[in-house]
Every structure is written in C-alpha cells, then in structure tokens.
Image (tube, rainbow, N blue to C red):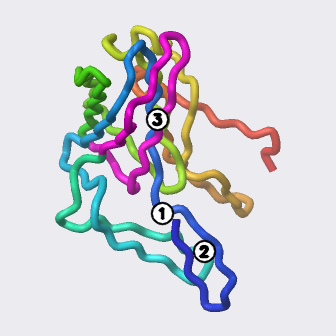
Amino acid sequence: MVAVSEDNNITFKNVCGGMKLQLKGAQKVVAIKLEGKNSEKLSGAATVTAYTDGETKPAITMASGASTSVTLNCGSGVQLNESTATEFILALPPVLFSKGFTVTVTDADSKTYTVETDKANTVLRSSILNMPAFKLGEAPGEDSGEGLIETVILDRTSLTMAPNTSYTFETDVDPFDVSDKTLTWSSSAPS
C-alpha cells in the first residue's frame, strides 16, 4: 500500500493485487512458485508512483532487472486437507499473464507438482484473482467443478455513472478454464 499527502491526512491505497491458489491433498506444502509464460516481471525492484489528488490511482512499474517469478516460502510447511482447500495468496503487481502461467508446488518431501495454463489471466490492482481449487497430483478440473462459473471478478469494486452513459467492465471468472464465459448483466435499479 502507498499513501501521499499534502495536508497530513493520509489515505492508503493498494498498489498490488493478488492471486489466490486453493490446494487440496495430503501433502505438506513448503513452497509455491509462480512464473508467467511471457517473462512478466513479478517481484523485485520497482518504482511506485502515488498522487495527492485523491482520485488518481497509484501505479507500479517493475524495474528492468525485476524477477520473472515469485515464491511463497511456507517455512516448515502448511499441511493440506484432502477435502477442504487451503488458500494461499500471492501478492503481485498488476499484471497480464498474456500466455498464461505456471505454478510449481514443493512439498516437505521435496516432491514438486506443476499446474499451468496457457490462457490469459489478469491480476488487477486492489483485487484478487481466484484460481479454482485443485488437488495436488490430479489434473485441474477433476475436482474443481469445471464447466461452472462460480465467481465473476470485475475490474472495479464501485462505479458512479451519470445517466445515459456506459462503462465496459473487464472481467475474469472462477474457475478460469471454463469454456462458456458468457456473462449477462442486469440491475435491480435500472435508473
């Protein structure tokens, strides 16, 4: 988060977003590594720009030498459960994974499990990209309710509009690998 002020009234704003991984299994997870398939910069040195006008969103620009991966170190390990997903959230700069990404999970026995997608996914500032739950050792979709949209993620949490104007939302859906992503919007207060 970042804050800047000219009058000592500080309002913090999120700079980054996140990706939520939901893992099941009998393993004890010691590390989770995320890499984009198009050399996206995910961690390391960056420049953060904040604005005092209260309206302009802060921005982050990753340095040319920033890393193309991010690893969540789980210390001595987090024990997974076979039936209930354990959530892991990776903090990330806003990023478009234009060619997808790869997640590598390492367990306490040094065994690795890799899950990947070739589909584009976007992490937005101040929001979390939810990945569908999967069991380590199984292909995603076998236990994730594939084919059903469970969550729709919008590019903003609020919007004020003048009458007779329009706005096109950027959306993601969870699970991210469903084939029919047709969304229909309606309002209980059309005015």
- Does dot 3 land on a helix, a strand or a loop? strand
Q: Is residue 180 visible?
A: no
- Pick out the residue farthest to the bottom: 7
Location of mark 1 (residue): 15
User: What residue lies at 37% left-to-right and 27% top-to-bottom?
Assistant: 29
The spot of residue 57 in percent (x, y) is 52, 69
Q: Is residue 179 left or right of residue 160?
A: left
Q: Earlier in the sequence, mark 2 or mark 3?
A: 2
Position above or below: 73 against 5? above
Position above or below: 50 against 139? below
Location of mark 2 (residue): 55
Q: Earlier in the sequence, mark 3 or mark 1?
A: 1
- Does dot 1 land on a helix, a strand or a loop? loop
Q: Is residue 80 left or right of residue 156?
A: left
User: What residue lies at 65% left-to-right and 59% top-to-bottom?
Assistant: 165
Q: Amino acid at mark 1?
A: Val
What is the crowding at mark 3: few (fewer than 14 residues within 10 Å), some, or many (at least 20)? some
Q: Give how far apart the Cα atoms at labels 3 and 1 are.
A: 19 Å
User: What residue lies at 56% left-to-right and 75% top-to-bottom?
Assistant: 3
**Chain part drawn in magenta:** 71-98
- Does dot 2 land on a helix, a strand or a loop? loop
Q: Earlier in the sequence, mark 1 or mark 2?
A: 1
Q: Amino acid at mark 3?
A: Phe
Q: Give how far apart the Cα atoms at labels 2 and 3 are.
A: 31 Å
Q: Nearer the viewer, mark 3 or mark 1?
A: 3
Q: Amino acid at mark 2?
A: Glu
Determine if the magenta segment contains residue 101.
Answer: no
What is the crowding at mark 1: few (fewer than 14 residues within 10 Å), some, or many (at least 20)? many
Location of mark 3 (residue): 88
The spot of residue 108 in percent (x, y) is 31, 24
Position above or below: 33 against 167? above
Circles 1 and 2, Cβ within 8 Å, touching? The answer is no
